[in-house]
Image: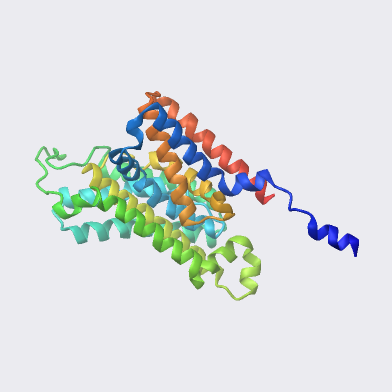
Amino acid sequence: METNLSAKNQTPKFDFFQFLYKYGTIITIVALIIIFSAANPAFIQGNNIINILRSISIVTIIAIGITISLSVNGFDLSVGSVASLSNAIVISMFVWFSQNTLVAIIAAIAASLIVGALNSFMIIKMKIPDMLMTLATMFIIQGIALTYTKGATVSQNMVMADGSMAEGLISPFFSKIGEVPWIILIMIVIVVLVHIFLTYTKHGRYMYVIGGNKEAARLSGIPVNKYKVAAYLLSALFASIGGMVLASRVMTAEINSGAPYLMDSVAAAFIGFSVLGAGKPNAFGTFIGAVLIGILANGLVMMSVPYYAMDIVKGTVLAFALAITYYKQK
């Protein structure tokens, strides 16, 4: 009896690591805001906050696709190349072929979904590990995008191969997508919709079950392969949307324009695992991870840190996030 009473009176032991796992990302964001604001008061001004949100929009959209692939215990490394391909196709539809906005967007999405279908087929039917297959796809699609554009930047009034000038114009409606507030609103809508899908719908819960234990999911009657196909198609779709938003923002199709977004997107998705102790890929956590990366990049620029040192900081943040995530899972 005394033993039971003493057990009840014992206060729960504070677990610092558990606290760090749940709230470390939020605390880091708050600390960075305080530090950067103290170093430069302009950091906390409204215009700069809008600039941060705009800068993370494309990263967040692409990272949401990675998050969905992670939910079924997959990993899509081809998203940067898919974004580049989508970027090239949508701009070329306007500039080379004088197509309207609907045709240009459908063409870019269709090409990206073909990549997603190829990934899922090779992973599911040919049993190639997700990371290896999407790594191969990354190089293949990167090469296709370069071949399609002939290694040139696609832009209005560009000189064509035959020496003539491109006569097509980018739609004014399409050009608005990459501007504030639309670029931020698109990001927010995607985060909210995917968060609802993964957290509150039957299909999202099935994806988490598959990610947790594929065999148990199969024995429960969940069509595992169909959901893995859906995950890679959705990953390609969001990479495509990210590429089109990028195209609207810069109004050109640069060579390998989507490649720089891969590292930031992967980092955002993995940082999101630990946000508020989720312990799994989730859209809200991915958004918070992107915010952390955006604040870091913006603050370091305002403190005149050389651009070539940025990747050191981003890589360190990713390594720290992975260390916490996998140590906790262990």
Image location of residue 317, percent across then percent down:
52, 37
Residue at position x 39%, y 23% in the image: 306
Q: Is residue 75 left or right of residue 111?
A: right
**Residue 314 position (above or below residue 285):** above
Residue at position x 49%, y 31% in the image: 313
| Quarter of image, res 157 | top left
Residue at position x 40%, y 26% in the image: 39
Whether residue 115 appears in this view of the structure is: no
| Residue at the extreme bottom of the image, as rendered | 221
**Residue 66 position (above or below residue 30):** below
Q: Is residue 146 left or right of residue 312?
A: left
Image location of residue 103, percent across then percent down:
21, 60
| Quarter of image, res 223 | bottom right
Query: Where does the N terminus fall, quadrant-wise?
Result: bottom right
Q: Nearer the viewer, residue 254 or 277?
A: 277
Q: Nearer the viewer, residue 298 or 95?
A: 298
Q: Nearer the viewer, residue 288 or 155?
A: 288
Image location of residue 104, percent across then percent down:
22, 56
Circle count = 0
Q: Is residue 208 left or right of residue 115?
A: right
Residue at position x 14%, y 39% in the image: 158
